[in-house]
Amino acid sequence: MEKTLLSFVALVLSLHISAQSFKLVNADSQSATVDFEISNLEKSFKIIEGKAYHTFSKQYSVLMSEKGLPAMPYFSKSIQLPEKGNYSYKIVYDSYQDIENIDIVPSKGNLKRNVDPENVPYNFGESYKTNDFFPGELVKFGVPHILRNTRGVTFSLYPYQYNPVQHKLRIYKNLRVVINFNNDKGENEIDISKTDHTFFNDIYSRHYLNHSSLNKYTPVAESGEMLIITAPTFENQLQSFVSWKKEKGIKTTVVNTTTTGSTDTAIKTYIKTFYQTHPNLVYILLVGDSGDVPSHTYGYNGEQLWSDSYYGQLSSETDFYPEAFVGRFSGNSVAVKTMIDRILEYEKSPVAGNWMKNAIGIASNEGDGYGNDGESDYVHLRKIRTQLKDFGYQTVHEFYQGSQGGEDAVGEPTPTMINNAMNAGTGLFNYTGHGDLNLMYTGNYTSTYVKQLKNNGMYPFVVSVACNNGTFVGKTCLAEDLQAASYDNSPAGAIATVASTILMAWAEPMETQDEMTNILTEAYQNNKKETIGGLFYNAQMGMLDDYNASATAKEVMQTWVLFGDPSTVFRYDTTKNFEVQHPMNIDPNAQSITITCNEPDASISLTKNNGDLIGSALSKNSSVIINLNGLSNEESLKLTVTKQNFKPYQATIQLKTLSVASFNKTGVSVYPIPAKDAVNLVWGNLKPSKVMLYDTLGKLLQTVNNTSDKKLQINVSKYPKGVYVMKYEIDNKTYSEKIIVE
């Protein structure tokens, strides 16, 4: 790739760029230009063997982490590339500033969370004897990656350059990167042969600076699909779960390992083939322990790198950006039943109260100057606590190692304190600290105490940044116990848990936890994610971006497992109720049905008895029209209305002949039949201009001129019980409908 380095006076920008920010200056199908402005250096020093060394850890989130090399900051962003071709780039700047007599702290390397960074000595590598600026290049591009229907590349900027022999820090001001696309052969080229899902359109807009300039596909406007791969022994247990997912509009396919094959390679091949014919695939659920549906290993690196996210990487085997979100029900038949019952309760009939507005934060006091943003674990979770409370969370428990002031109690947190908070009701549970197979070290919270939980109906999403809480292959881990927990023959424990199958990295997963909080609290425009899979995997992709898919970032992506259903819609607010209006009976020959809902952006789905989806849509302007075809008389339909933080509305609509044949062609629905006080008319494209009510002798009782665009209500409360005839005019033609008043 071509690259040039030259100095220029930066062009005046139309908008102010905030500190350490990227700004897309212009973009089209041929190129993209990105500006970057850095804030003033904030000096902070670490004393090593009596000498002061500057550390960037207090000012910037992401630092270079090669052991013995200067821990320099870098800043990363992704741009979308054309489906085919290569690119060249050049980087320019307007000036630089030199700071003399300064030395930079070396990195301690990529540490795991089974050690305290403070106990690891500093090491000064050979680069500290080299009379040259480090890291040298101002920009580095990664390998092009594939994210479903798009192709992109992440680049990192290094505006700080350090010469250890001259004890000089050089700061480059106002960097600009110009990327030009060309027709040369490129890496990871793709062919777009299918439409994509609206859910991922939002992800692309967040992921790529220039997505709008290269957006060529037309996203579909329906819920994503789910593929469930189960061991045969659990297939019958899944019926109620599958029925519910279909009712709420998620097309769901269930296959067992007899069909897919029982090895990780065979299962992956099956999923990739399925994805080619089901481009709306978003969720993959594995049902069974590792002995039933195997996890994949990326090899041995002191321990086996067990991975479930492997099954969601469907376009490229090397970039680790997921095309689908993977979760797992791991356990025996009893545990799987508990998980299913818990999700059905959580999504369909949540326990009343404000328990979901409470959260827990448990953290060690280690990692100062080494964790993401240079924060120790408890400072990291305290910052998240503030963000959650600003968003509307009420109680966010502080359970920190040592005595950290604020609302953190003096001394160490105890398992009883944690269980009391869980039993009182909480919707989110963040842990950041040391861990083991069945242990969160801070608070000494073990599987033994998980099995004592009594939090029926009030289930938190547990996010564990710790070693081995998810090591489930051939063992039973803390995450599995949280999913299997029950009390008094009813589910307890967690709605879902994300936990690592290996010794976890220190800083990178903290960035995922930060990013998940940002998404949850809607810190970004147009990046609202409602499902547990959406929250977790989007946060993981943000971490991959920020660390430019470093080896450690990839390992975190590989080995952090979601135990639970990725399509579960997360609750963070008190449950509200819908007001929904619709006919209770419709003619089987009707062309459409109109449903009115008081909430915008509610998902409205209509399914047949066998679970086949007739149609679904998001409520806009309070009503939706769902087209009907292929229905039979006396069949019943299931109407389901869902939205985050709402209790679902469900009703049965009966199909039976209601009126003369001419009525069937109009698309007008009349309800309820029978009626007590009022009869409602709703319509699709054909609006009645006038409505007349007659008794059975043909006497005109009432005439209403229709001025409404959506719905008309006719008062019948003053008429005696009996049968009446309603006539209405459409385009100077009159249609009739029998109604009953009771």
Image (cartoon, rainbow, N blue to C red):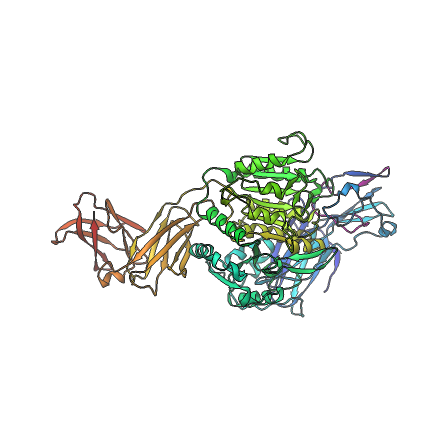
Residue 148, percent from left and from top: 57, 62
* Residue 500 vertical position relative to residue 428 in the rendered view, above or below: below
> Which residue: 55% across, 34% down?
395
Q: Is residue 439 visible?
A: yes
The front one of 97 and 386 is 386
Residue 410, percent from left and from top: 66, 29
* Residue 503 vertical position relative to residue 424 in the rendered view, above or below: below
Query: Residue 664 occupies which quadrant of the picture?
Result: bottom left
> Which residue: 76% across, 43% down?
117
* Residue 437 vertical position relative to residue 217 in the rendered view, above or below: above
Q: Which residues are magenta?
A: 50-70
User: How many numbered marks does the figure carry?
Assistant: 0
Q: Is residue 16 visible?
A: no
**Magenta stretch containing residue 680, yes or no?**
no
Q: Give the main secondary structure, helix, strand or loop, of the magenta stretch.
A: loop
233 relative position to 154: left or right: left
> Which residue: 49% across, 44% down?
490
Residue 285, percent from left and from top: 54, 57
Residue 731, percent from left and from top: 24, 60
The front one of 209 and 226 is 226
**Magenta stretch containing residue 51, yes or no?**
yes
The front one of 720 and 287 is 287
> Which residue: 54% across, 69% down?
193
